[in-house]
Amino acid sequence: MDNRNKTLRIAGGIVVLLNIILFFLPVAKYEQVNYPIETYSQLDYVVKVWSEDAPYELPVSTGRVVWMLVVILLPLFLSLVAGIWGMVGRERQIVSSILIFMVLALYIAFVCSLGLYFPSKYYTRDIAGSGNLICSTAASILALITLLYKGQETEEPAIVQIPQVRELKQEQIEARYSVLAEDKKEPLPKEQTAMIPPYVPGVPKGVMVGLTGIYAGAEISFQDGECIRLGRLPNNDLVFEGQDKVSRNHCYIKWNGKEKSFVIKDFSSNGTFVDGSEDCLPQNIEIEIPIGSVIAIGDEKNKFRLE
């Protein structure tokens, strides 16, 4: 999603926040001959709702208090939340848009019922009521455009981009690790593992050699401090497509060149096994693995030797 969506959402947040300013502006005015014009804002209504000199002639009632809470204070609070959320929230959130639509509905109810609590025989309407409708409508239009714009933008990548990313990732794996297997989705036959030379103890080289599976024959060299991630998802460094025993994000292997040691941290559900052990490595803990160890990723189908 580009910056235009975020700009529209910020603009909608700013517009809906204008309702807070309108809360202090006149919503109704009372005119008498030879007397100055008296104006009343929504704030005046809230402050004087229990007062005897309230700016209306109706007696105090539950309905009047409920009207104040529902169509004056509630949309004011929602305008504040929607405005702040729209400006500081993430581009993909839609909560601010929903709140803006609610604000519009409440202010429509406010304007439509205004004559009940500021009787037209005594009062005429002023700027605030119309201003609330204009600001809420404008903010709702911006929120609607934001939602529609986002829906159009997220459609294409699922069809066009994902295959390209998958192809590029496969090319990078082949170029970096010189995988000898021609078909990456099927494990090599067991007889081909005999072509891999046996391990000869010596100076640690920081190399991971594929023994079985789709990376059989590959020699994967580590840089000092380099961390290589293994799993089925394409965002891993070694991708195991079609391998059911390998988790989406299975584990990572790190080489410490100064200490000449390998470290493995496992995240998988089927486990990572060392030197044929029946017990898998503990999850979410970095474990140092001795040089020359053979690790199995998920099961025996994908094995590597650490040299």
Image (cartoon, rainbow, N blue to C red):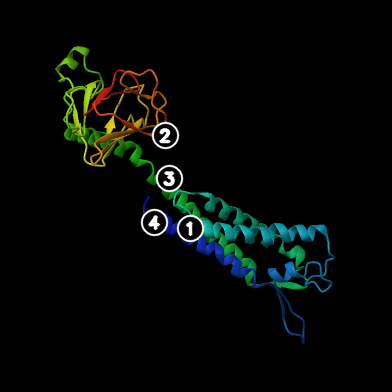
Between marks 1 and 2, how big is the CA–CA gap?
34 Å
What x and y, as percent, mark residue 248?
37, 30
The CA distance from mark 2 to mark 3 is 37 Å
Mark 1 is on which residue type?
Answer: Val
88 and 256: which is toward the camera = 256
Please state the horizontal and vertical placement of residue 180, each as a whole percent of the image.
16, 24
Query: Residue 118 occupies which quadrant of the picture?
Result: bottom right
Report the mark closest to the observer, 1 or 2. 2
* Circle 2: element type: loop
Q: What element carries label 4?
A: helix
* Mark 3 crowd level (few <14, some 14–19, many ≥20, 10 Å Cα): few
Give the quarter of the image for residue 197. top left
Q: What residue type is labelled 4?
A: Arg
Amino acid residing under circle 3: Gly
Name the residue: 42% across, 50% down.
149
Circle number at residue 88: 1
Q: Do the residues labelled 1 and 2 touch (CB within 8 Å)?
A: no
Viewer-proximal residue among 156 and 215 = 215
The relative height of residue 197 versus residue 307 in the rendered view (above or below) is: above
Circle 4 Cα neighbour tier, 10 Å, few/some/many (<14 / 14–19 / ≥20): few
**Whole-Å distance between the Cαs marked 4 and 2?**
40 Å
Residue at horizontal 47%, vertical 49%?
147
In the image: residue 294, left or right of residue 128: left
Q: In which quarter of the image is residue 199?
A: top left
Q: Which residue is drawn at 72% across and 81% down?
A: 37
Which amino acid, mark 2?
Answer: Asn
Tag 2: Cα neighbours inside 10 Å, few (<14), some, or many (≥20)? few
Q: Which label number is shown at residue 4?
A: 4
Q: Residue tagged by mark 2?
A: 284
Q: Which of marks 1 and 4 is nearer the N terminus?
A: 4
Question: Residue at label 3?
Answer: 151
